[in-house]
Amino acid sequence: MQTGQRVAVTGMLVSAALAVIKIAAGTSGHSTAVVADGFESAADVIASGFVLFGLTLAAKPADDDHPYGHGRLETLTGLLIGLVLLLSGALISWNSIRRVGQPHQVLQAFVVWPLLISLAAKTGLAALKFRYGRELQSDALIADAWNDAMDTISAFAALIAVGLTLSDAVRFAEADRYGGFAVGLIVVSAGVRVVRQTTMQLMDTMPHPRLIGQIREAAFGVPGVRGVEKCFARKTGFKYHVDLHLEVDPEMTVRQSHQLAHEVQLNILARLEWVADVLVHVEPAP
């Protein structure tokens, strides 16, 4: 099993355990906010499952029908995670707000502990997924990391709501339910962020100018290159595919210019691990 897949499985196991603990504690302790946070953790299990599925399929090598590989499946997985977050957050908010004004039982103090455990666990998971997501250039893993990061905020919001109700059950009688509503809104905001980021990748948005600068620098590192007229890059899964318009001496033979283009391609691939392939178009320098 690859590193990304192991991280996704770890996330699924931790989220599943947290979901069971929080839903059970919130139900028995009469806390809408804790139950809402528990259902949010249950949605995380689905999200991490999508990550595992996407990473597995994205690792398949290129074939005749998919010459650029299957990496876009991993980006699509990130988009699915964002949509799951949007839907689950909306449902959590709606279920919490509809309970406002309804009779409720006395909130039990022990519901605080699952939230503290969740806060610690999700902080660790988010850090782990951000680390490996950036290392592997994985959109799905980074999307899942943002999901876990938002979970820490939602757990903190639920903790505040529960604390207010426990401190003054008369004055803050509905704080717990409004806390559940806030948890849902936080999840929705995370979903919007993830959907936006993955959509930009699917639209072939150019990478950061710093990365384009690295490509140009690697191209100019080959003797004989007169200039780089155009440099485009699009992300396909974990890495980028680059289209480069190279300017060379117009008096070069076709064989010489072809050899130079090949050397440029090899130099970029050797220096930049995040580049999957380079297509070089040769033009006469002005």
Image (spheres, rainbow, N blue to C red):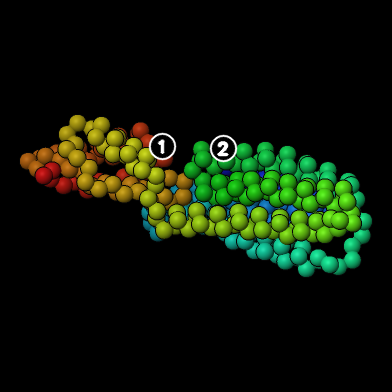
Residue 204 falls left or right of residue 41: left
Q: Which residue is mark 2?
A: 131
The answer to which of 54 and 220 lies nearer the viewer is 220
Residue 70 visible = no
Q: Residue at x 90, y 50 (%)?
A: 108
The answer to which of 64 and 51 lies nearer the viewer is 51
Within 10 angstroms of label 2, few (less than 14), some, or many (20 or more) residues?
some
Q: Residue at x 82, y 47 (%)?
A: 163
Q: Residue at x 15, y 40 (%)?
A: 248
Q: How far apart are the alpha carbons under marks 2 and 1?
A: 17 Å
Classify the position of the C terminus by image quarter.
top left
Residue 261 falls left or right of residue 126: left
Amino acid type, mark 2: Arg
Residue placed furthest toward the left: 251
Residue placed furthest toward the front: 171
Say which element carries label 1.
loop
User: Residue 238: horizontal and vertical position, in percent?
Assistant: 47, 46
N-terminal of the pair, mark 2 or mark 1, is 2
Residue 243 visible = yes
Label ID, residue 273: 1
The answer to which of 100 and 20 lies nearer the viewer is 100
* In the depicted structure, whether residue 63 falls above or below residue 7: below
Classify the position of the N terminus by image quarter.
top right
User: Residue 64: horizontal and vertical position, in percent?
Assistant: 38, 56
Amino acid type, mark 1: Glu
Q: Residue at x 35, y 34 (%)?
A: 270
Q: How many marks?
A: 2
User: Residue 160: horizontal and vertical position, in percent?
Assistant: 77, 48
Q: Quadrant of residue 39?
A: bottom right
User: Residue 188: horizontal and vertical position, in percent?
Assistant: 63, 59
Label ID, residue 87: none
